[in-house]
Image (tube, rainbow, N blue to C red):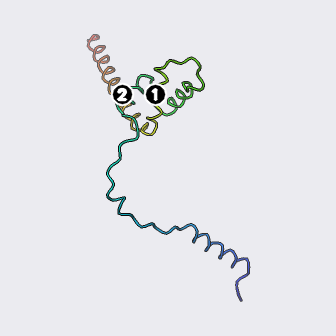
Amino acid sequence: MGRSPRKTARKDRRQTRRQTQSKPKSKSNAKSKTRSVSVAKYNSTRKCIKLFKRYRLTDTTKLRKWMNNNHPDKVTNQSSKVEDDFKFITGCWANRKDIFKHVKSKTKSKSKSKKKKKVKEIKGDQL
C-alpha cells in the first residue's frame, strides 16, 4: 500500500518550498571588517528637538498632520523659513522616536514642578 498520488505531490511541493526559502549564508568579506564608521546621514538631533518644540510636534500623528499641512507642493504662499524647517524636519524623520523621547521628557519635568508649587501655595494659604 503506497501513498496516494495527492499526498506525494503535496510532500514534493513542501520540500521544494523549503529549499527555495532557505538561503545559503554569505561569507563575510574582509572589507566589511576594516571599514571605518560612516558619517551620520541624518540631521543633528539638537536642532530637530528645537524645531519639534517650536511646532509642538510631540508624537507621530501630529508630525504627519503638520507635514501634510505644510508640504511645499500643497501650500502656495509659504514663507521661506517654514520651507527650510520642513526640509530639515524631513531629515529628522529617521530619528523621530529618539527626538520624541527628548521632547516629552523635558516638557513633563517642567509641568510637574509647576503643579507641586501651586499645591504647596494653596495649602499654606488655608492654614
Residue lying at 29% horizontally and 18% vertically, measured from the top left? 117
Residue that carries the numbered disc 1 in the rendered image: 57
Helix, strand or loop at label 1? It is loop
- Categorize mark 1 by other alpha carbons within 10 Å: few (<14), some (14-19), many (20+): many
Say which quarter of the image contains residue 98.
Answer: top left
Residue lying at 45% horizontally and 30% vertically, measured from the top left? 89
Can you name the residue that lies furthest to the bottom here?
1
Report the front residue among 43 and 7. 43
Report the front residue among 30 and 94. 30
Comes first in the chain, label 2 or label 1: 1
Say which quarter of the image contains residue 45.
Answer: top left
Can you name the residue that lies furthest to the front here?
31
Verify CB contact (< 8 Å) between mark 2 and mark 1.
no
- Left or right of 125, for residue 48: right
Can you name the residue that lies furthest to the right here?
5
Q: Which mark is residue 108?
A: 2
Helix, strand or loop at label 2? It is helix
Q: Residue flagged by tag 2: what amino acid is it?
A: Lys
